[in-house]
Image (tube, coloured by chain):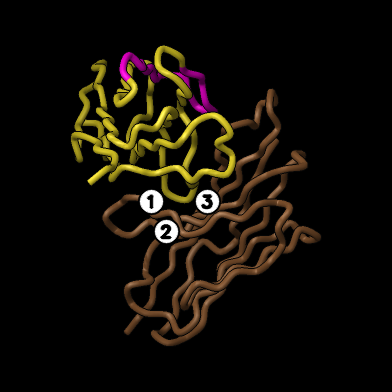
Chain colours: A brown, B yellow
Amino acid sequence: AQKVTQAQTEISVVEKEDVTLDCVYETRDTTYYLFWYKQPPSGELVFLIRRNSFDEQNEISGRYSWNFQKSTSSFNFTITASQVVDSAVYFCALRGYNAGGTSYGKLTFGQGTILTVHP
Amino acid sequence: DGGITQSPKYLFRKEGQNVTLSCEQNLNHDAMYWYRQDPGQGLRLIYYSQIVNDFQKGDIAEGYSVSREKKESFPLTVTSAQKNPTAFYLCASSIAGDEGYKPQHFGDGTRLSIL
């Protein structure tokens, strides 16, 4: 069975602070994919990043960076110099790739972290 | 612009009534999904379809039904058997086949409430 845990239910920061959103996952698949999505108040989920299980390189995209550590089954997301527009719910998700297995094609989401950035 | 359209944005259901949520996509994606979102529980998969005329139950399919008669459409019916239907429903689509690495694209959602 797959499981994604986002232990932080809500985070509140002041603009320009750095903030890290934690994500821990469980899977028996040897190949899997990890995703981060952002859900603004409008409701639509916006894809932010995908990471393959065999690629542990960290990634930076502007103010966003992701730290994937297979040894600790974590895929944490950091926003540097946060802005009010970053306020949203952020979801970490996992999809296994075990052709023929029950996890194939399914996307398992964490509970989400509500981030509020105050001006 | 290509995307996923969900309608209506808000929907109210009376006791014992079936209601249908619409999901249409013009991304030419083979796979489509329905998720339910409740506060503090993230998104849970209701049904998914990887090809026309075929669909599979997700983790919480009881009380719901779907059809996939056309590639671009994947309507979800919330039946009277679903005793707690109040939630936010999200439809998604993605490229099928070796889809593990392809992100899913989401619609704006439908908020369903009981009258």
Q: Is residue B50 magenta?
A: no
**Magenta stretch: dominant SS?**
loop
Dots 3 and 2 on the same chain: yes
User: Mark 2 touching mark 1, by CB under 8 A?
Assistant: yes
Residue B108 is situated, as x and y percent measured from the top left of the image, at: 28, 45
Q: Residue at x 62, y 59 (%)?
A: A23
Residue A49 is situated, as x and y percent measured from the top left of the image, at: 52, 58
**Secondary structure found at label 1:** loop
Q: Find residue A45 and name its label.
A: 1
Task: Kindly identify the amino acid type of the residue bearing the numbered disc 3.
Answer: Gln
- The earlier-in-sequence mark between 3 and 2 is 2
In the image, is B104 to the left or to the right of B6? right
In the image, is B112 to the left or to the right of B53? left
Q: Residue at x 26, y 17 (%)?
A: B18
- The earlier-in-sequence mark between 1 and 3 is 1
Q: Which residue is mark 2?
A: A38
What is the crowding at mark 1: few (fewer than 14 residues within 10 Å), some, or many (at least 20)?
Answer: many
- The earlier-in-sequence mark between 2 and 1 is 2
Bounds of the magenta span? B55-70
Q: Residue at x 24, y 38 (%)?
A: B5
Chain name for mark 1? A
Of the residues tagged 1 and 3, which is closer to the observer? Answer: 1
Q: Quadrant of residue A115?
A: bottom left
Task: Kindly identify the amino acid type of the residue bearing the numbered disc 1.
Answer: Leu
Q: Residue at x 32, y 85 (%)?
A: A119
What is the crowding at mark 3: few (fewer than 14 residues within 10 Å), some, or many (at least 20)?
Answer: many
What is the crowding at mark 2: few (fewer than 14 residues within 10 Å), some, or many (at least 20)?
Answer: many
Q: Quadrant of residue A1?
A: top right
Q: Which residue is mark 3?
A: A111
Chain name for mark 3? A
